[in-house]
Image (cartoon, rainbow, N blue to C red):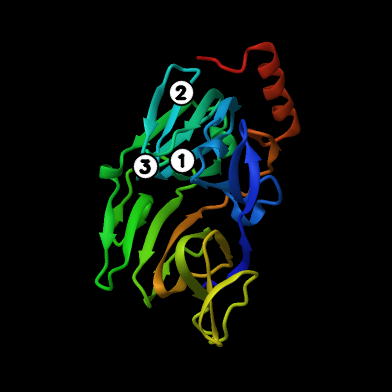
Amino acid sequence: MRRPQKITTAQPHMEGAGVLVHRAFGFGDTKPFDPFLLFDDFRNDDPQKYRNGFPWHPHRGIETISYVLEGTVSHEDSLGNRGSIGPGDLQWMTAGRGILHQEIPLGNPLGKMHGFQLWANLPARQKMTKPRYQDIRARDIETVVDDDGTSVRILCGEFMGKQGPVQGLAANPHYLDISLPPDTSRSIAIETTRHAFAYIIAGSVHFRDGSDPRPVQTQNPFNSRSATQQFNGNRSLILFDRGDSISVESGHEGGRFLLVSGEPLNEPVAWRGPVVMNTQAELDQAWRELRNGTFITE
């Protein structure tokens, strides 16, 4: 089984026009997460900390994945697309050769906003592909409920023979929203070739190597059932080593986490801000095109 290789807590960070996010990883050494580049948790009950949003900005060479649990996010882009996503909705944007867009979190009537953004890298052969959106409504996302009460929303990829709605992706990622009932133990298969991480969003969850009865020591133990078993709490990021499955157990209050995995690209990364290419020359060209107005080709 895969053992937790590293456990950290998402840290507060200002993005856009003053949006408080909690960044789990990004803008550093992302090789252990390849093909993923960044993961942000933007949840808040104070509209002043998110309402200015993420004004017009460019992307090239990546895919941005927005998943909303509470509130709504409006968006528009340089190609004339516009709309909004709400609770349970997913938007998978392939920036490809270039797009300018903006995203404005609006919250719900009580001012609550809760969502996530994940960045996935594109392989060199698809860096300059045509931009596209896959807007997925909550009603179109398959939910599987197992006999033990475990509930899994399949945002992307496959689980228990069911397929998620997002198709045609470079790294064949799997993105699952998993809810465990209280005091539930189970294993979840993950292909050995994939990099994988989990992010806890509610309750308490514990991951361990099934062959090792000792507790996994964490930087932020959230709860303990006994002196011999530690649980990880809200906003904990767990990066797994290699193996064919993970072993997970929930605490007394149950737990909910996102499980993300993908095939590593193993390609060089040249990265500045929202543009990710393979070489410094390609990166410099992208920013020259932004300056001279030739970044958008359609």
Callout 3: 10 Å neighbours few (<14), some, many (20+)?
many
Q: Which residue is mark 2?
A: 76
> In this picture, is 4 found above or below 45?
below
Residue 245 visible in this rendered orientation of the protein: no
The disc, 1 or 3, on the residue closer to the chain's N-terminal end is 1
> In this picture, is 126 found above or below 211?
above
Callout 2: 10 Å neighbours few (<14), some, many (20+)?
some
Marks 1/3: CA–CA distance: 12 Å
| Amino acid at circle 2 | Glu
Callout 1: 10 Å neighbours few (<14), some, many (20+)?
many
Query: Taking 200 as reference, is 239 left or right?
Result: right
| Amino acid at circle 3 | Val
Query: Taking 270 as reference, is 187 left or right?
Result: left
Front residue of 118/285: it is 118
- Residue depicted at 64% across the width and 12% down the height: 293
As drawn, the label of residue 166 is: 3
Front residue of 155/112: it is 112
Q: Which residue is mark 1?
A: 66
| Amino acid at circle 1 | Ser
Task: Name the spot of residue 136 as percent of width and height, x first.
Answer: 34, 38
Task: Name the spot of residue 144 as percent of width and height, x first.
Answer: 27, 59
Task: Name the spot of residue 133 as percent of width and height, x first.
Answer: 41, 30
- Residue depicted at 39% across the width and 70% down the height: 254
Marks 3/2: CA–CA distance: 20 Å
Residue 230 visible in this rendered orientation of the protein: yes
Mark in front: 1 vs 3? 1
